[in-house]
Amino acid sequence: MLTAGENLTLHCMLKGFGPPGAVKWQKGTDRSQPPVYNDKEPSSSPTSRVARIIPGSNMDYSIRISNIQLKDAGTYFCLKYKAGFPETEYKSGMGTEVLVLATPSLPKITGPPGRVDSGASVTFNCRSDGFFPRIITLTWIKDRRTILASWIAVVPPEESTSYQVMSAVNVTLTERDVKSELTCQIHHSTLPGPLQKSFKLGDALRVTPKMSVEPGQLIEAVMNELVTITCSAKGFYPNDTGLAWKENGSETDLPMAESTTQDYDGMFSMRSILEINATEQRNHSIFTCYAVRNSQPLDPVNVTLKIHREEAGQRPSFNPGVWVGFGLNKIVVLLLLFFFLRKMLSQENQGTSGAAAPARSLQENPAGQ
């Protein structure tokens, strides 16, 4: 058993004298295939990997195959032929089985042909080729956590000089998988460590934005007031979504400003600010903000504009702080009036009691006159 890249020596000795004819090296039992070496037609190519160890010897027909490769694995036979038309096989050696250790190729992961929506179950496949011996371990890992494969197979099932491993796994994608990775990892006796390939799940994921508007879906304004509406598309992926506006079902050319940000979890958010002059003609107009992805509109959100006929700046405004302060002032004034009246009544009662006392004293002592 050799490792790919090493040199292989195949020994063959002829004893005694045989009939005239060629000596050949053949791989496998199919004699119709071209020989690996023919002493009557030795290759003179400088790129040939096969050469006699002792050129010109009538007894030693050993050969060396340089830089052994996986395709060189098989059973080699040293054959003595008897010259003639056609030549015939005279004697054959017992055969030498050659096994070549080969490392598996870098795993290849394939996912869905296009992006899928969050919540969908997706099948991923992994494959590695050209290894020997047959025993191999394939493991699926998602964010450092091992997950079970749907199936795994090593082919061909019968004895061979080269094998292939294939496996599949089902993964339900969620919004949290934007930054997740799926890894196919292989362990084989010819490897000093695991061989692996990763797939970014965000490359297969699509998340639809959540739409909202501010200050609300009903806006009240006075005539000729400048109204600002902010439309937000939050939590979408990838960054292939834009925002558009319609006024009463028709595209609008009103001035707007857009901005896009990416959150810590990898998701994107977008805002579009629309400025509207609240003219009388726009009373009860409906403004529609909708997301656009790959030229296709997504679910919209509507805003209705209700206009008051007062001139701008004349509509009374409600200030909770003012009303609270006004109420407190009234309470304080009432309390002061209460205590003031109470004090006056108390003083009047005391004056009345002091004037009546001498009269009673005179009546009680008439002799004092």
Image (cartoon, helix red, strand yellow):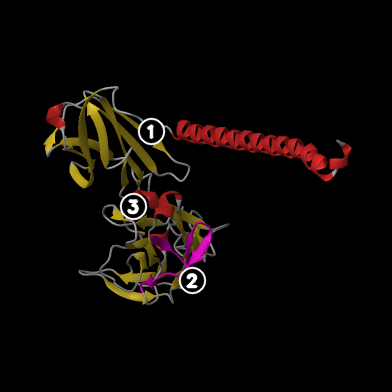
Between the residue at mark 2 and the residue at mark 3, the CA separation in whole angstroms equals: 32 Å
Q: Is residue 90 left or right of residue 288?
A: right
Quarter holding residue 288: top left
Report which residue position mark 2 lands on.
Answer: 135
Secondary structure found at label 3: helix
Circle 2 or circle 3, nearest the eye? 3
Q: Nearer the viewer, residue 359 or 268?
A: 359
Residue 134 within the magenta-colored segment of the rendering: yes
Q: Nearer the viewer, residue 303 or 191?
A: 303
Q: Position of residue 80 (x, y in %)?
A: 36, 70
Instruction: Report which residue position mark 3 lands on.
Output: 204
Q: Position of residue 210 (x, y in %)?
A: 32, 48
Q: Are marks 2 and 3 in contact (CB under 8 Å)?
A: no
Is residue 278 inside the magenta stretch?
no
Q: Is residue 222 above or below residue 357?
A: above
> Real-space Cα distance between discs 3 and 1?
51 Å
Res. 200 in view: no
